[in-house]
Image: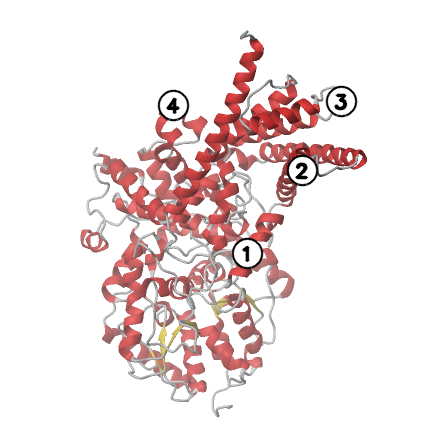
Amino acid sequence: MTPNEKIMQLLKSTETHFTPPALTGEITIPAVCSGASSGNRPHIMTNKEQLKTLGYPTDGLVDNWKEVFLKKMAEMLDKYRSVKLFLKICSKCGNCADKCHFFLGSGDPMNMPVARQDLMRKVYKRYFTFSGVLGLPGYNSLLDTAELTEELLVLWYTYFYQCTECRRCSVFCPYGIDTAEITMAAREILNSIGLVQKNAHVLVNNEITTGNNFRMSPLAFVDIIESIEEDLRDETGINIRIPIDQHGAQVLMILPSADYFAPVNIESLNGYAKVFHQSGISWTLSSYAADGANFGLFAHNYENMKKINSRIWKASRELGVKRLIAGECGHMWRVMSSFSNTMNGPFDWLSPKYPVPQHICEFTYDLIKRGALKFDKTANDHLTPTMHDSCQIARGSVMGGKYGQFEIPRAIIRATCGKFVEMAEDTIREKTFCCGAGGGLLGDEQLPVKLRGATPRMQAYTKVKHEHGVNFIASICAYCKVQFTHLLPHFGYTEEEVGGVHKLVSDSIILGAKNF
Amino acid sequence: MEINVYTLINAAVYLLLYVSTVVFIVGVWYQISDIVKSPNPLVIPQTPQSDALCGVIRGMAGDLFVFKSLSKGNFYLWMAGLTFHITFAVLMGFHLFGLVTYLASENIHISSEIMETLSIIASLIGVLFITSLIALMIIRSNDEKSSYYSGFFDYFVVMLIFMIGVTGVFMKISAFSPNLPAVKNFMINVFSIHPKAVPLNPFFIAHISLVSIMLMVFPFTKLIHAVGFFFSPTKNMPNNPRTVRHINVWD
């Protein structure tokens, strides 16, 4: 067996099913169960063309993988202060250990953030410090170091794809050590030696080559939007437009593709369209930048992330718009609000009077404050909603002020619904539990991991369900909505119990005469 | 000159003190340069984070003085860790106070009552110091999770500092106290690089030897967090990427 054949054998997933436990409403710290989550791994990408486009080896594990590994790791350490610093300063206090939803859902000690980081830290100490390099391999346990072996690669490939890069661990760390930064570096190192995770990287490839996750042509995009527009017209009896490629419009709106594919998310798109209609502000979508999703975020491959993001700004320039507004998507908002300016800015063709970019919730909230939108809250009386703060928005973005990303969506929910209940304090806002499936963990083969990861959030939801009759999870992330839609039935709940904040807007907004 | 065991002890202590000081300074300098060599390409603050520098400083002060982020998690870990660090800082302050008042004893005169009161307070704080370290050791050994992330140096470093505290507190017990004027003279000799006899109190020699060992391992173990904290991009970057363009130096 060649080393490549051997590793591909080791990397096959051995866990395909997982039955989540019955929900009690309490989040308990599990007993440590070594290896509880060690059998599930995402598929490896084998399509040579896609690998070539992405710039990764095309024939699986490269022969000189140890050399390439260390070279890429050195590059990560040189380019990212976060990676280097966080490997150096962890004082093993353990505060992060029981904060990760993947640990809470499985008890697997490797899913403790500190242990996940140690997978890289031990390699760092062995090959990048004086004592590690000097020390003979036999001193591994004394110096807390690890050798580069195929077994280590399996651990890396397993556990760095059981991290959704949600940054929850970082909230509790006295130094703010961000495991997501380590995971991003680890994934790019694995990519450089030929072990490329399939699902997320198929999307990176699609986003680079076609500008959307589904390899849709512009005509196909126009088709889908037109049919949504038609449904909207039928539903409201009003000619509400969803313009595409409209030169000279005020606003370019960037959506996650789920907003025009998944039924739950389309309701949010209806919400945006109704808000624009009422506001009288001209807007447009772009068939060139039809999808804001940027999976380049999930590994430290800056070039891919930048390339994908540049479409948005090119479209805004070519369409001659003055504002750019982002739809309800978690990681897209992080990349757009926190990274765009650095990667593709400055954006001097856009009006400085408005945030660049602006979140649709900021836009809607501003209109609500000015009295430009009116709602009939009774339309949402059948719902007792709670807010699920999505990780990339809660812990990695800006929406005005220190807490805008929490206050603004909640203000919109309160404006559109008669009832609102918060989940437990340590499960929301900056301590929010990830839905369990972002960060590139999309593959169905990772369902066992995703079910375990979603458990803490499901427990928190169950608690408010039992105590306050909550029956709806509002969220402003496309992936949270998709994940919950898939997973709620596994926990005994229904798909209808999740939706966007703009679905609540869509169902209660009073259309017609303008109010200003 | 007669060479006997005392000469050897003197030589060893002075060698340890000077070598450890050099290693500490060079080591910390190296670590800082290594950290700043790598840039922050992107703005990655953690929530909550102010969009202005003064807010960022306020936030970091929260973490520095009351371990704000740690307080969001395990209560006992936070209490023990904070107590340890605060008592450590206060004890360092007392050491500095002692040095300064001795050096300026011609100009500053502090009454013996005040000095005695301060001495008692220092002893109590010293006891609190070692108690907090015992609490931290209990937390680390009791928690079943900790064996998965604690290594040899995690136990070694806490034991080292614990023994520094124990030897220090024992010196407050009159039966074990060294000759105070001799100690003060010795410290002056050390700082002025004018080696003379080391006071032969075993606790004193153990105390400064352990401190030297700690200074030597400081830059190369997790103790470097004391310096590294200030460079954490999730803590020290203002959350204003939309209004201020952060430059990625390698793009």
Coordinates of residue A165 in the picture (x, y in percent): 42, 52
Crowdedness of circle 2 by 10 Å Cα count: few (<14), some, many (20+)?
Answer: few
Amino acid type, label 3: Ser
Marks 3 and 4, Cα distance to the nearest angstrom? 47 Å
Q: Report the front residue among B164 and A101.
A: B164
Marks 4 and 2, Cα distance to the nearest angstrom? 46 Å
Query: Is residue A376 depicted above or below B245 in this figure?
Result: below
Amino acid type, label 1: Ile
Between circles 3 and 4, the one closer to the viewer is 3
Coordinates of residue A77 in the picture (x, y in percent): 35, 44
Between circles 1 and 3, the one closer to the viewer is 3
Coordinates of residue A318 in the picture (x, y in percent): 26, 77
Give the mark, 3 or 2, whose residue is nearer the N terminus: 2
Amino acid type, label 2: Phe
Q: Report the front residue among B96 and A110.
A: B96
- Give the residue drawn at x 45%, y 81%: A275
- Badge 1: chain ID: B
Marks 3 and 2, Cα distance to the nearest angstrom? 21 Å
Residue under pointer 3: B174
Residue under pointer 2: B97
Marks 1 and 3, Cα distance to the nearest angstrom? 44 Å
Residue under pointer 1: B57
Q: Are marks 4 and 2 in contact (CB under 8 Å)?
A: no
Q: Where residue A138 is drawn, which disc sits there?
A: 4
